Image: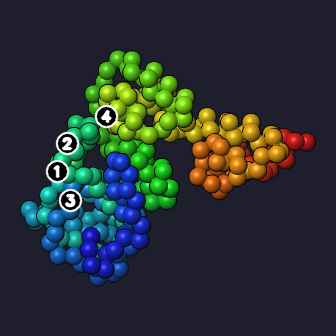
Amino acid sequence: MGADGHPFRVERTPLATVGAYALPAGYAMRRHVHAGAGLVLGLSGAWVGTLATRREHACGRGEIVVLPDGATHRERAPTGSRCLLVTFEAGRRDLDGATLALLARDRKLPGVGLERRLAKARATELDAIVTELLVALTPGGRRDDGRWLSTVCEALDAETVDLGRLAALAGRTREHVFRSFRAAFGVTPGQWVRARRLERAARLLLDRRRTVAAVAAECGFTDESHLARWFRARFGAPPGRFRRLRSR
């Protein structure tokens, strides 16, 4: 995506680069190549890509188009488009075999319901959501006896949720760790750690000497609003109200 298609947000994680684009009506970009494979995720309008093979893919809301590494293509947005572009470094070998196969051929896929989350996510959450996206697009994957899960659980007990580090500890790919952990425990690694942090925050809030902002920082949330969003979803009330109710 190029002229008149500048991203209004770009975030880089150890796994991928995520760019959010607002393309005006009539946008067109001549033939070019992206460095590394990518996924275009439609948020609104329609992004249309034409590959060198003359195959055309239109990516509308809730749809995904795969752009393989080195795929020459042109793109346009006749009526305008808001979309995400997730790109992966060329030549990396730490991705799951199913992921590499997914990214090897251009194709159009139905969305998996993560587009909006990805667009709104904080930078610290992107790596986990991109991994979740890859797992959702590549169901199955290789299976093993899962003995390494205890190593992952020990790291998570220390509230380490860096999927790259967890994968290295387990000797598996990010996608395999994510898929196997969810199958074994019914939650993702991120959800596991978040639940522990929220439980800790609830305990600390009973100490009225601590401010909500201090509790948020102590429990690993980026700020007070970040804690409030997840705290309300978990306990049905924002931190301040929760504290008042428990202090009666």
In the depicted structure, whether residue 222 falls above or below residue 53: above
Determine the residue located farthest toward the bottom in the rendered image: 26
Upstream in sequence: badge 2 or badge 3: 3
The spot of residue 146 in percent (x, y) is 38, 20
Residue at image coords 27%, 27%: 142
Label 3 neighbourhood size at 10 Å, few (<14), some (14-19), many (20+)? some
Label 2 neighbourhood size at 10 Å, few (<14), some (14-19), many (20+)? few
Q: Nearer the viewer, mark 3 or mark 1?
A: 3
Q: Which mark is residue 105?
A: 1
- In the rendered structure, which amino acid carries the disc numbered 2? Ala
Classify mark 4: helix, strand or loop.
loop
Q: Which mark is residue 101?
A: 2
Residue at image coords 57%, 40%: 194
The spot of residue 147 in percent (x, y) is 39, 17
Classify mark 1: helix, strand or loop.
loop
Upstream in sequence: badge 1 or badge 4: 1
Residue at image coords 36%, 27%: 170
Residue that numbered label 3 is attached to: 35
Q: Quadrant of the C terminus?
A: top right
The spot of residue 178 in percent (x, y) is 40, 35
Residue at image coords 82%, 45%: 209
- In the rendered structure, which amino acid carries the disc numbered 1? Arg
Q: Quadrant of the N terminus?
A: bottom left
Q: Are marks 1 and 2 in contact (CB under 8 Å)?
A: yes
Give the Cα separation between the discs numbered 1 and 4.
21 Å
Residue that numbered label 4 is attached to: 173
Give the Cα separation between the discs numbered 3 and 1.
15 Å
Give the Cα separation between the discs numbered 1 and 2.
7 Å
